[in-house]
Amino acid sequence: MRFILFRTPKPKQFSYTPRYYDPEKERLERRKAELGLRSELSHKESLRLRMDKTWKKHDAYSKKNLVAKVIYYTFFAFLIVGSIYVILFTDFVEKLLALFGLAYQ
């Protein structure tokens, strides 16, 4: 730091430009960008918006797909358990073999 004897330094200058934020205009611009219309959003913001929209759609598809898988596996689990019960704990197989004339040993 320099030693200044008779002169005081000026305060540092800064430039401040106040910004006006309009949430309605921001919402409208985002909606325009979602629909693919011409908007004032920057390329970075529009890219982020498209990525977010794609991820949300993929996430919703994954949840639907998960529910379908759970239903599918539950149905087949009941089918297998029911089949094992009928074969081992009822006389259905013996009656079926007798119906076709086959002897059960």
Image (cartoon, rainbow, N blue to C red):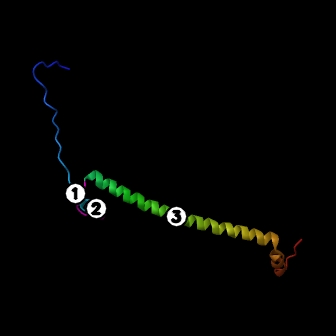
- Assess disc 2: are there few (<14), some (14-19) or many (≥20) residues with their C-alpha within 10 Å of its C-alpha: few
Q: How far is disc 2 from disc 3 in space, using C-alphas?
A: 31 Å
Instruction: Name which residue lies at 31% across and 62% down.
Output: 34
Asked which quadrant contains residue 12, the reply is top left
**Element marked by disc 2:** helix
Q: Where, quadrant-wise, is the C terminus in this rendering?
A: bottom right
Q: Nearer the viewer, residue 95 or 65?
A: 65
In screen coordinates, is 58 left or right of 26? right
Q: Are marks 3 and 1 in contact (CB under 8 Å)?
A: no
**Element marked by disc 3:** helix
In screen coordinates, is 85 left or right of 71? right
Q: Which residue is mark 1?
A: 40
Among numbered discs 3 and 1, the one appearing first in the sequence: 1
Q: Amino acid at mark 1?
A: Glu
**Element marked by disc 1:** loop
**Residue 38 highlighted magenta (yes or no):** yes
Q: Which disc number belongs to residue 27? A: 2
Q: Where, quadrant-wise, is the N terminus in this rendering?
A: top left
Region of the chain picked out in magenta, as a range: 29-41
> Residue 31 placed where, x, y %?
29, 63
> Residue 104 placed where, x, y %?
87, 73
Q: Which residue is mark 3?
A: 65
Q: Nearer the viewer, mark 2 or mark 3?
A: 2
Instruction: Name which residue lies at 29% across and 53% down.
Output: 45
- Assess disc 3: are there few (<14), some (14-19) or many (≥20) residues with their C-alpha within 10 Å of its C-alpha: few
* Most distant residue in the left direction: 6
> Residue 84 placed where, x, y %?
76, 68
Q: Nearer the viewer, residue 53 or 5?
A: 5
Q: How far is disc 2 from disc 1 in space, using C-alphas?
A: 12 Å
Q: Amino acid at mark 2?
A: Arg
Vertical order, 90 against 12 (above or below):
below
Among numbered discs 2 and 1, the one appearing first in the sequence: 2
